[in-house]
């Protein structure tokens, strides 16, 4: 697959001493090093279970909440922001969670090289950078090639869940996902999903920020055919 986009842009951020310590102390337990070879997920978690991968988990609150609430499933988070990773590792260690792993690398390369086809039951991409300026739209991660990659990593019937609070990006996401032949829209009339009726999740930090600014949150839910 041609690497035209990345799943992130490196931004500097203040990391606390506790987060820095967590990266050193808890990475051996929860961290998975990036290597250009397919992961054996059953071996990684020590069992066969439904698997969710979240791309760009921020500070990890939502991901950890799900892992704790669903101990019968396994969760993988992909993020490159060191303070956010440190925050999650610290919280995960305190919670003594067993079904969570973290990869600190570009999600596109992780999906291409580490995740086998048809090996995930769910992928979540919540509030990716909308790149609002027109000249930056090419940097948006939700593009046809990337969506096809995501779909290929889902099992039959697996779910792809996206959310954004940027209306123009929401419309673009909907157009791109509806155009992927491997996916079927779970919403009526091929539109956005009614989150209260279908999805159970807490608000992420980025969602709360968008809502404070008066932005409308749009949710998309697609199923692998």
Image (cartoon, rainbow, N blue to C red):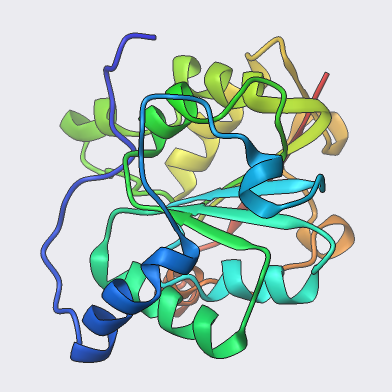
Residue 67: percent from the left, percent from the top? 69, 68
How many numbered marks are there?
0
Whether residue 123 appears in this view of the structure is: no
Q: Position of residue 44 (x, y in %)?
A: 61, 48
Relative to 223, residue 161 above or below: below
Choose between 212 and 62: the one closer to the eye: 62
x 37%, y 25%: residue: 36
Quarter of the N terminus within the rendering: top left
Left or right: where 64 falls relative to 13: right
The x and y percentages for residue 20 are 22, 79
Q: Is residue 83 visible?
A: yes
Q: Quadrant of residue 201?
A: bottom right
Q: Quadrant of residue 200?
A: bottom right
- At 82% across and 65% down in the image, what residue appears? 196
Which part of the image, by quadrant, shows the C terminus?
top right
* Most foreground residue, 210 or 85: 85
Relative horizontal placement of residue 223, taking residue 167 as reference (left or right): right
The residue at the far left in this view is: 12
Q: Residue at the spot x=41%, y=49% of the render? A: 128
Query: Residue drawn at (72%, 76%), measured in percent from left and top?
Result: 68
Q: Is residue 130 left or right of residue 189?
A: left
Q: Up-down: is 10 above or below 36?
A: below
The answer to which of 13 and 214 lies nearer the viewer is: 13
Q: Is residue 179 above or below residue 102?
A: above
């Amino acid at each position: 697959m041609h690497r035209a986009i990345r799943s992130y842009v490196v931004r500097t951020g203040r990391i606390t001493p506790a987060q820095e310590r967590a990266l050193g102390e808890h990475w051996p337990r929860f961290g998975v090093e990036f290597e250009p070879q397919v992961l054996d997920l059953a071996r990684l978690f020590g069992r066969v279970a439904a698997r969710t991968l979240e791309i760009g988990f921020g500070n990890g609150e939502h991901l950890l909440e799900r892992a704790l609430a669903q101990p019968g499933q396994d969760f993988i988070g992909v993020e490159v922001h060191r303070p956010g990773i440190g925050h999650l590792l610290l919280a995960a260690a305190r919670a003594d969670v067993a079904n969570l792993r973290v990869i600190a690398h570009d999600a596109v390369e992780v999906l291409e090289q580490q995740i086998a086809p048809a090996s995930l039951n769910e992928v979540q991409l919540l509030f990716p950078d909308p790149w609002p300026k027109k000249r930056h739209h090419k940097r948006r991660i939700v593009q046809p090639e990337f969506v096809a990659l995501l779909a290929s990593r889902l099992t039959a019937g697996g779910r792809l869940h996206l959310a954004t609070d940027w209306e123009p990006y929401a419309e673009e996401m909907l157009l791109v996902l509806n155009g992927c032949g491997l996916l079927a829209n779970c919403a009526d009339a091929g539109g956005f999903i009614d989150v209260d009726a279908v999805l159970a999740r807490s608000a992420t930090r980025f969602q709360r920020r968008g809502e404070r600014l008066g932005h409308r949150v749009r949710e998309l839910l697609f199923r692998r055919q």
